[in-house]
Amino acid sequence: MTYNLRVFFVGGYLSYRALFNWMHWSYYIPTMLGAPLFQILFFAYIGRFAQVKNDEFFVVGNAVQLSAMAGIYGMAMTVGGERWTSTLSSLMASPANRLPLFLGRALPIIANGIITSAFAFTVGWLLLDFDMPASGIPALGVVVFVSAFACTSLGLVIGAVGLRARDVFFLANLFVYLLVLFSGANIPLESLPGWMEAISRVSPLTHGIQAARAIADGATLAEVDHLVWTELGIGGAYAAVAYALFRFFEIEGRRRATLDTM
Amino acid sequence: MKTLRLLWVGWRFYVKNLTLSGFFILTSVIQPVIFASVAYLMFRAGARQETLLYVALGAGMMGIWSSTLFGSGGAIQWQRWQGTLEYCIAVPPPLILIIVPLTIATATIGLYSLTATLLWGWLFFDVPLAVSDPVAFAVALPVAVIGLGLLGLVLASTFVLYRNANALANLLEYPVWLVTGLLVSLSLLPGWVGPISWVLAPTWGVNGLREAAIAGNPWPEIGMCLALGAVYLVIGHFALRHFERLARERATLTLT
């Protein structure tokens, strides 16, 4: 138990520091705070120009969606980075339990997603026409945590595919862009064609964003709990798929000697 | 003549090279199509009756900027990683003649994005492809590519001094989309954004394309894009010389 906890916390911490070039501020700030700031401004101004929705719609949608960016890129790059630095084989050869090994890598990334989202909400409050009751902040925190978990689970699936696919970064970018389109962060769900709306209903983020918008409008956590549970369920389903894929591709990678293929 | 041949061969080589890159296919085809879809759906859902061709051209230009930003921003660093930077500097032609074809090639790859967003819009969103002044459009397009390519030269020669150039590239994608009015009218933005947009080639490039495609007189925008390109060339020339001198003095040419 102690051993698994050590793998979970210490392994996750070291992996996270490596992910951001040993957490150098010159990489972290432009990528994790600068780009999100301008993403929110960009979509909020398109919203104003197209007269589609008010600023609150875009601030909340993008602030929650930004937790996806951290979760998906983070998890995909964790596996891709192990392969790039030729440490994936050593990791796979270790006797460590795979569950804490990879979930430990997910935890700091979920925390990072929450920080990015919190920064985005603050920016929206400071620079745009966005306000919400302070009493809603704890409930919003829960929703962002659950959404970040769901997206990190999707990132784990992409990371697992990265054990087989050569270009995991391509996949990670693709999924982040697809979530911009399908999650309802910038387009009202009722405006999506039927087939797109159906996809958005099983995607991470969609229900989290809906819940966050309701909370920003004054709803309580109890009033949106069905959305939160759905988001949690979707995240749990992706995490289960990711674990199964990790095991499958690990066994296949050993059998075919393809773990270090680049 | 030798210079023109060098530019032509370099440009052709880099276009072929970049076309084989999965990352550039993503930034120049898939990403613009997804962002164009978001923009089409937003404008359809909104109350403003803006022509979808206006949106399609803006979304296409977004792809050209992304391709230039990520391609040119890391151009010199790539040469470093591949171990070819010493050869680029040691060969008899000036370094600028080696780098300019590369940065223009990164903007050229962005043409895939314009083609993709226009075709995507035509197929799935009923975007009309009728261009009101085809001759002006045929001139405005390469001028926009050259303008952005030369802006790429400035990026290539300045980003190299920054250790995490790719982080800077991540940062600059959205703000330039915003302040150059690719999908949002500049009149909506604060007044101080205006002067920033005037010194950026995408502003004039997309306006030239829109004036030629939809209605109006595109020639002043085309002229501004060319003039800005000339300014970028001068800045890039001095910045590259500065980089080359620093790299030789500090013996950092091959350091990655």
Image (tube, coloured by chain):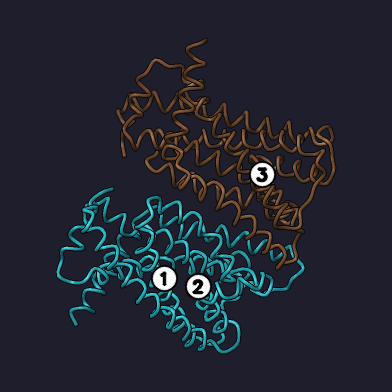
Q: Would you place residue B67 above or below residue B94 in this image?
A: above
Depth check: give the residue in front, A188 or B76: B76
Q: CA distance from mark 2 to mark 1?
A: 9 Å
Residue at (49, 37) in percent of width and height: A158
Callout 2: few (<14), some (14-19), or many (20+) C-alpha neighbours within 10 Å? Answer: many
Single out the residue that lies furthest toward the top: A1
**Which structural element holds mark 1?**
helix
Q: Are marks 3 and 2 on the same chain?
A: no
Mark 3 neighbour class, 10 Å CA radius: few under 14, some 14 to 19, many 20 or more: many
Q: Please name the color used to draw chain B.
A: cyan
Residue A166, quarter of the rendered image: top left
Q: Earlier in the sequence, mark 2 or mark 1?
A: 1
Q: What amino acid does circle 2 point to?
A: Pro
Task: Give the letter of the chain under mark 1.
Answer: B
For badge 3, the amino acid type reads Val
Residue that carries the numbered disc 3 in the rendered image: A64
Q: Amino acid at mark 1?
A: Leu
Quadrant (top left, top right, bottom left, bottom right) of the N terminus of chain B: bottom left
What residue is pinned by disc 2?
Answer: B202
Q: SS class of the residue under badge 2? A: helix
Q: Secondary structure at mark 3?
A: helix
Residue ranking furthest to the front: B249
Compared across the picture, whether B28 is left or right of B45 comes to left
Q: Which chain is brown?
A: A
Residue on which the image places disc 1: B151
Looking at the rendered structure, the number of numbered marks drawn on it comes to 3
Q: Residue at x 39, y 75 (%)?
A: B232
